[in-house]
Amino acid sequence: MAIIIDQEQKLLTPHTITLHTKNTTYQMAVGAYGQLLHLYYGPRLDGDMRYLLTYYDRGFSGNPYEAECDKTYSMDALPQEYPCFGTGDFRSPAFVLKNADGSYCADLRFVSCEVCKGKYQIPGLPAVYDETGTESETLKVYLEDAVSGVQVTLLYGVFAELDIITRAVQITNHGDKTVHIEKSASAVLDFMNGEFDVIHFHGRHGMERIFERTSVEHGNQVFGSRRGASSHQQNPFVMLAGKQTGEDAGECYGCMLLYSGNFKAEAEKDQYEQTRLVMGLSDEMFSWRLEPGETFDTPEAVLSYSADGFSALSWNLHRLIRSHICRSAYRDTKRPVLINNWEATYFDFTGLRLSEQRQMVQTDSTSMKHRTQLNRITSQEHSLYMQACQSHAWTTSTVHGRCI
């Protein structure tokens, strides 16, 4: 099984939950007072990783009420799966809830969890899919804020053969009062140790996806978009990599948000040299009214780990996108040639004009490369293409395409 829930150990934590892929392991545990703690994400291994947690008195870091005089248990220092604002953790939160009385606080505690065959789906949002239901498993972890009655369901999709873990969050108001979601990230990764670089891809028109690598320093580094779209200025993908990681060697973690609107990625190093990565919706000018009985779904984030550099991480994501994100009749077959009508016609084209372009390229002896590619269009395809163009009267409303 890709997902293992250990309910027998009754020491410091009542549960450990382990997600295995072919080459990686992701593990979490329920803390002594019910908070869901993150333990490990990295090369595949077996065992209980709770020994990595460090408990000692940390000055000016608050403690849960139930801890009473135990100063060694602080949310300001412990690694968490879904950190909330208002629990004494002063790092970047994943979840900010505004209650009916105007207070900003949520204290999510573990309730239960379950494992399902196949991959969860998100209503109305793009997500990774598993057509057969045999290539993935889903973990659902239920957390609840006792005061507001808000339930948060953490969703994990495990594609073991692809070394992929997906994450999303469902927030349901089971209380009797209206609340507002002020921030709800899709994924968080907490690292108790390690020195990292953060890598993202910025750009501009005509110069997209520029690789930029900087050291994760103390404080918060933020990448995102306020344009209403992910844009070519900022791409909703970020990596954490070891200092010596390159194309073919070294550790790196990738986080990709399947969402084309405003987003926010944060990389933060805290006072104890711990690193936190947060990815999700932008919280700027975001406030979602959640009435009793309503549910809010976040976009999906895709996580992958590579011990063999950036190339292996890219391959993991490429395999996933080709087989479990793309939805096309040509997903597993040879695709038709695309005629680019950006600079060629600036979208001012008809079926007849496209046909003329094709003929021009075929007869132009200086365009050997283009002619070779376009010759892939068979006479039958061309006939179907012209029929479709004539019947639908394609105009400038068609974007970047040809009709076959």
Image: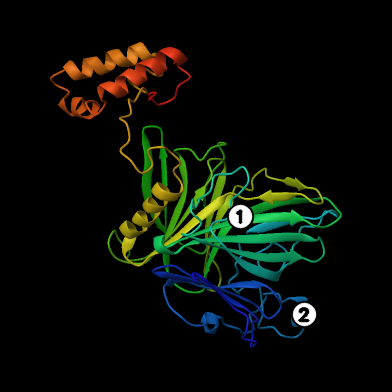
Left or right of 202? Residue 66 is right
- Position of residue 275 relative to residue 206, above or below, is below
- The quarter in which the C terminus is drawn is top left
Residue 394 drawn at (x, y percent): 44, 16
Left or right of 216? Residue 7 is right
- Position of residue 52 relative to residue 172, above or below, is below
| Amino acid type indicated by mark 2 | Glu
Q: Earlier in the sequence, mark 1 or mark 2?
A: 2
| Amino acid type indicated by mark 1 | Ala
- For the point 40% across and 32% down, the residue is 205
Residue 210 drawn at (x, y percent): 36, 44
The residue nearer to you, when weighing 267 against 323, is 323
The residue under label 2 is 66
Left or right of 285? Residue 292 is right
The answer to whether residue 338 of the structure is visible from this angle is yes
Q: Residues within 10 Å of mark 1 (few under 14, many from 20)?
A: many
The residue nearer to you, when weighing 145 against 227, is 145
Image quadrant where residue 337 sits = top left
The residue nearer to you, when weighing 64 against 40, is 40
Residue 276 drawn at (x, y percent): 53, 64
Mark 1 and mark 2: Cα distance apart in space: 27 Å
Q: Residue furthest bottom?
A: 11
Left or right of 229? Residue 213 is left
Query: Which element type, helix, strand or loop, lies under badge 1?
Result: strand
Q: Residues within 10 Å of mark 2 (few under 14, many from 20)?
A: few
- Position of residue 80 relative to residue 103, above or below, is below
The residue under label 1 is 185
Image quadrant where residue 335 sits = top left
- For the point 21% across and 19% down, the residue is 361
